[in-house]
Image (tube, rainbow, N blue to C red):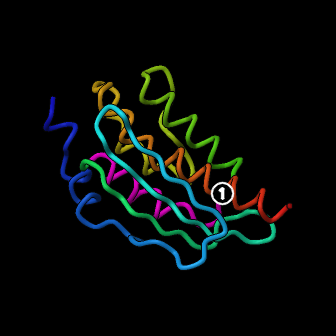
Amino acid sequence: MLSDLYNERILALAADIPRLGRLDAPDGSATHRSRLCGSQVTVDVMVDEAGKVVDFGHDVRACALGQASSALMADLVVGADAAELAEVEATVQAMLKGDGPVPEGRWAELRVLEPVRAHKSRHASVMLTFSATREAVERATQAAAA
């Protein structure tokens, strides 16, 4: 049901996305685009010596669901490293496919995306921010190690 999918919380997140805009000199960046719907997310990160995110910026050109997932990422990402982001990405992907639990701990707020499970055509837009953020952090940590 679309009213479950585009619930009040999803719409509120999409209307107020934090950390919008690109960083001036990011340590790592990544752009991901959904071929299915055309949504696109570009993520910039700054990481510390341990590879943990200390700053985050993003350009979001997506539907309300993509905007909501990006808003949640912007709220929660500071302090995460590539391994944590890969785990969160896998958890959300499993949740959407229907066989996985909702995220827990500091990522528990991502459960608001659970209604997307029933709408496979919307999964790609929701997942953009997760894959782009993980890739940006991986690039930043690889660059620091080189």
Left or right placement of residue 48 versus residue 39 in this view = right
Left or right placement of residue 115 versus residue 72 in this view = left
The quarter of the displayed image where residue 3 is located: top left
The amino acid type of the residue labelled 1 equals Val
Quadrant housing the C terminus: bottom right
Q: Nearer the viewer, residue 98 or 62?
A: 62
Question: Which residue is rendered at x = 46% and y = 50% of the image?
Answer: 129
Q: Which residues are magenta?
A: 65-81
The residue most toward the bottom is: 24
Quadrant housing the N terminus: top left
- Tell me where residue 23 appears, x and y as whole percent: 52, 75
- Tell me where residue 83 appears, x and y as whole percent: 71, 47
Question: Which residue is rendered at x = 58% and y = 43% of the image?
Answer: 88
Magenta stretch holds residue 78: yes
Question: Which residue is rendered at x = 32% and y = 54% of the image?
Answer: 67
- Tell me where residue 6 appears, x and y as whole percent: 19, 43
The residue most toward the right is: 146
Question: Which residue is rendered at x = 55% and y = 61% of the image?
Answer: 77
Up-down relation of residue 136 to residue 122 (above or below): below
Left or right placement of residue 29 versus residue 61 in this view = right
Magenta stretch holds residue 141: no
The quarter of the displayed image where residue 90 is located: top right
- Tell me where residue 47 appears, x and y as whole percent: 69, 69
Tell me the residue that label 1 is attached to.
137
Mark 1 crowd level (few <14, some 14–19, many ≥20, 10 Å Cα): many
Secondary structure of residue under mark 1: helix
Q: Nearer the viewer, residue 120 or 6?
A: 120
Q: Main secondary structure of the magenta part?
A: helix
